[in-house]
Amino acid sequence: MYVENNITIAEPVALKAWCERRMVFIELTDGRTISFPADRFKILSDASDEELSKVELRLNGYALRWENLDEDITVKGIVAGNFQLPLA
């Protein structure tokens, strides 16, 4: 949560995350489903489809975790469009 103009605004967090055809999908608490190409992150770009499929929610939906890859990505960063790599 954060305050903007004396109004408390809740950050959307993930309810569900999954991968399909090298795309990572996130269902958010505000009703949106967003996605991004796995290739926008260095470690994910080198991962196999099987490795990508093992995404888990962490920190009550504030982060995505790939334990097998030792990779964490914040939902806030994804929503803001903070990616490591440009679109190919």
Image (spheres, helix red, strand yellow):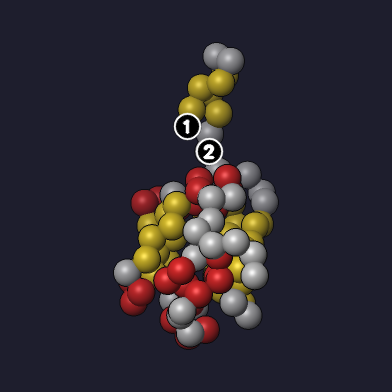
The crowding category of the residue bearing disc 2, from other C-alpha atoms within 10 Å (few below 14, some 14 to 19, many at least 20), is: some
Element under disc 1: loop
Residue 68 makes an appearance in the image: yes
In this rendering, the answer to whether 85 lies above or below 31 is below
Return the residue found at the far right: 32
Q: Amino acid at mark 2?
A: Glu
Give coordinates of residue 56: x percent, y percent: 42, 66
Give coordinates of residue 7: x percent, y percent: 57, 19
Disc nearer the start of the sequence (2/1): 1
Quarter of the C terminus within the rendering:
bottom right
Give coordinates of residue 53: x percent, y percent: 49, 78
The residue at which mark 1 appears reads as 1
Instruction: Choose between 41 and 9: the one closer to the eye.
Output: 41
The crowding category of the residue bearing disc 1, from other C-alpha atoms within 10 Å (few below 14, some 14 to 19, many at least 20), is: few
Mark 2–mark 1 CB contact (< 8 Å): yes
Give coordinates of residue 48: x percent, y percent: 48, 85
Element under disc 2: loop
> Any mark on residue 58, and which?
none
Q: Identify the residue at image location x=44%, y=76%.
A: 54
> Any mark on residue 11, and which?
2
In this rendering, the answer to whether 67 lies above or below 2 is below
Q: Quadrant of residue 27?
A: bottom right
Return the residue found at the far top: 6
State the CA–CA distance, disc 2 to disc 1.
Answer: 5 Å
Q: Identify the residue at image location x=55%, y=70%.
A: 38
Instruction: Choose between 81 and 2: the one closer to the eye.
Output: 81
Left or right: residue 57 compared with residue 28: left
Q: Identify the residue at image location x=53%, y=56%.
A: 83
Instruction: Choose between 49 and 18: the one closer to the eye.
Output: 49
